[in-house]
Structure formats: C-alpha cells, structure tokens
Image (cartoon, rainbow, N blue to C red):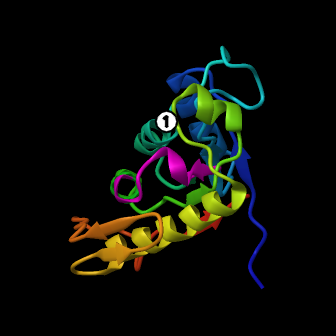
C-alpha cells in the first residue's frame, strides 16, 4: 500500500502568489503543489486572473527544491502532443525531476470556443488523449520516436534531452 500524501491546489492571481504558495506548501511539508490549465478560471469568470499553467509551474520549480509540481490537469488538446512532450520534459529538467504530468481530455466548451479551439465530442477528446499519451511515451523513451493514429502522426519526433525521471515523469489522469 502507498502512503497517503497531500498536495495543495493553488489559484494564484499573479506569478508571485504562485511562487509564494509553492514555497509555503513546501515549507509546510506538502507532497505537491498544483495549478490548473485553463484560459480563464472555471472557478471565476472570463475576467478572473489566470496564469498559464506550465510557465507558472516552471517559476514555482525555480523557487522550490523538494515539492512535486503538477498541472491539475492539463488539457491535452490545448497543445500538440510533441509540443506537450517538450514542455513537460523542460519542466522536468527545471524542477530537477519533480514533475507529475496531470493530463485530461478538456471539458469547458466555452473556453475552447472563445479561444478558437475545436471542441469535439467526449469520445473523440478521449481518443485524442489516448493518442497524446502514446506520443508522449514514445518521445520520452524511443530513440527515433514515431506514432501514427487516427488523430495524430509524428515521425522522428526527437526529444533531447530526455526527461530526468525514468522512464518518464509520472502521469496523473483526470476527467
């Protein structure tokens, strides 16, 4: 059985609030600190401040040394799978191997529509999430990463340097 661990979910209005929240959570002994991946907060309105997830987590990583960092959860459809692999690998390096990659299929339709993203059916978004995970794993582990699926195809999608965590950062799926 795994030990019970506790994390904090931060809703920072500024980068400094995110950094301060992560430092406080680390000092208080929390296992992880998370921020959401939205264009605007689902807990506010479209004008509520919302920091970009991976940039915020990178800033938090540069001001902490032990706490795990996780998007809760990144919408796989906001970034192409190869771009997401590079971002996650870079964050894994910036945090010295403290990334937990939280991923989901996305759900807030208005957010997609207002920002010019297609919002396919739930079943299609879940298929895309599955293929995204396969591409991430290929780019984290294969010498010559490639994948061909229904929604995505990559060839020679090199990802160097590879992630610090082996074989790749842990995945946390949300839905």
Looking at the image, is 41 positioned above or below residue 67?
above
Magenta includes 78? yes
Relative placement, left or right, of 26 versus 44 is: left
| Segment colored magenta | 70-83
For the point 22% across and 67% down, the residue is 158
Work out which quarter of the rendered image holds the N terminus and state it.
bottom right
For the point 21% across and 65% down, the residue is 160
Looking at the image, is 30 positioned above or below residue 132?
above
Residue 152 x/y as whole percent: 41, 64
Q: Nearer the viewer, residue 115 or 82?
A: 115
For the point 78% across and 69% down, the residue is 4
Work out which quarter of the rendered image holds the C terminus and state it.
bottom right
Residue 90 x/y as whole percent: 33, 53
Can residue 53 be seen from the camera position used here? yes
Residue 146 x/y as whole percent: 30, 76
Q: Quadrant of residue 50?
A: top right
Magenta includes 76? yes
Which residue matches tag 1? 56
Can residue 163 be seen from the camera position used here? no
- What crowding class fits label 1: few (fewer than 14 Cα within 10 Å), some (14-19), or many (20 or more)? many
Relative placement, left or right, of 75 versus 148 is: right
Q: Nearer the viewer, residue 101 or 118?
A: 118
Judged from the image, the secondary structure of the residue bearing numbered disc 1 is helix
* Numbered marks: total: 1
The residue furthest bottom is 1
Residue 157 x/y as whole percent: 25, 67
For the point 22% across and 81% down, the residue is 143
The residue furthest top is 47
Q: Nearer the viewer, residue 89 or 69?
A: 89
């Amino acid at each position: 059985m795994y030990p019970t661990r506790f994390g904090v979910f931060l809703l920072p209005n500024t980068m400094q609030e995110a950094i301060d929240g992560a430092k406080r959570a680390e000092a208080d002994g929390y296992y992880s600190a998370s921020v959401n991946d939205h264009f605007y907060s689902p807990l506010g309105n479209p004008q509520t401040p919302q920091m970009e997830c991976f940039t915020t987590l990178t800033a938090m990583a540069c001001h902490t040394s032990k706490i795990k960092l996780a998007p809760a959860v990144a919408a796989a459809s906001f970034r192409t799978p190869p771009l997401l692999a590079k971002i996650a690998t870079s964050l894994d390096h910036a945090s010295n191997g403290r990334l937990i990659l939280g991923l989901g299929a996305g759900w807030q339709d208005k957010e997609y529509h207002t920002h010019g993203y297609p919002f396919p059916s739930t079943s299609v978004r879940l298929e895309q999430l599955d293929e995204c995970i396969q591409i991430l794993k290929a780019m984290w582990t294969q010498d010559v990463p490639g994948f061909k699926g229904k929604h995505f195809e990559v060839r020679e999608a090199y990802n160097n340097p590879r992630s610090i965590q082996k074989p790749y950062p842990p995945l946390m799926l949300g839905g």
